[in-house]
Image (spheres, rainbow, N blue to C red):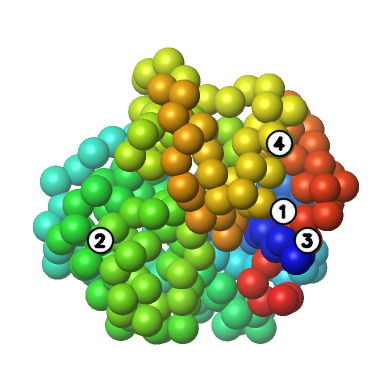
Amino acid sequence: MSHFIDLNSDLGESFGNYTLGMDADVLDHVTSANVACGWHAGDPLIMDATVRMCKEKGVAVGAHPGYPDLMGFGRRKMAVNPDEARTYMTYQLGALQAFCQQHGVELQHMKLHGAFYNMACVTPELADAVLDGLQAVNPKIRAMVLSGSYMAQEAVRRGIPVIQEVFADRGYTDNGTLVPRTEAGAFVKDPQEALERVLMMVTDGKVVTNTGKTIDIVADSVCVHGDNPEAIAFTKYIREGLTKAGVVVANFQSR
């Protein structure tokens, strides 16, 4: 039995005079890109250039909506009501979809950013509003969501195509959420350890948590990062290791 996995990374996070990340290099190793939509990062010129690069390199494009929090890079919790969450989706998805149409590429998926992502995973009314916005814009866009989360289950119930996401370089708690960045065990820094964890998630559907417990997990796409040379090498190592193990690395548009 062949195993398939998508590799995704958060890109297009430069804006104005500020350059963040190493997008051109990352795109040589991933199969899907989550493109910032201008609120936590990114701007129209960067969105345009990133979608163009994705097309040139055969990388699928996804929208990466965040909170309107440029100063905090979208990582600060905000008190957002359902109507706000829904319209945030409409606004940001619509903007990136326009650039995709301009370049003749399909918008493959939507993945929330930062605090928006984390809060929607555990707040049903927020997740519902996000999915309402997604369906209103384009019900064919896949929802890339934390594996096993309420949002994943609700998207399946609604008939929304779902990509369940796991992380190569992050630790997991016993309930399947990510260990907070401020706590011990939040990050996996050794490439070989990360590869072994990813292979376990992809081939066995299991992951070892920060307490040593083994839990079930569904891995459709693995998030990797590429904001510095070490991260690029880490991502390259993961992809090469997956290929050597016989795992087919591909996005959902090329299967």
Please tell me whether mark 2 sits on a helix, a strand or a loop: helix
Which numbered disc, 2 or 3, marks the residue closer to the eye? 3
> Which residue, as the protein is rendered here, is positioned at the far right?
244
Please give left or right for residue 124 compared with residue 58 in the image. Answer: left
Q: Which mark is residue 248?
A: 3
The residue that label 4 is drawn on is: 195
Kind of residue at disc 4 = Leu
Gap in angstroms between the C-alphas marked 1 and 3: 12 Å
Q: Which mark is residue 127?
A: 2
Please tell me whether mark 3 sits on a helix, a strand or a loop: strand
Please give left or right for residue 134 compared with residue 210 in the image. Answer: left
Sequence-earlier tag: 4 or 2: 2
Gap in angstroms between the C-alphas marked 4 and 1: 15 Å
Q: Position of residue 22 (x, y in %)?
A: 70, 41
Kind of residue at disc 1 = Val
> Contact, CB < 8 Å: mark 4 with mark 1?
no
Residue 172: quadrant of the picture: top left
Sequence-earlier tag: 1 or 3: 1
The crowding category of the residue bearing disc 3, from other C-alpha atoms within 10 Å (few below 14, some 14 to 19, many at least 20), is: some
Gap in angstroms between the C-alphas marked 3 and 4: 15 Å
Kind of residue at disc 2 = Ala
User: Residue at 71% of width from left, 36% of height from top?
Assistant: 195
Q: Which mark is residue 30?
A: 1
Sequence-earlier tag: 4 or 1: 1
> Contact, CB < 8 Å: mark 2 with mark 3?
no
Please tell me whether mark 1 sits on a helix, a strand or a loop: loop
The crowding category of the residue bearing disc 1, from other C-alpha atoms within 10 Å (few below 14, some 14 to 19, many at least 20), is: many
Q: Position of residue 83 (x, y in %)?
A: 14, 67
Q: Position of residue 98 (x, y in %)?
A: 50, 78
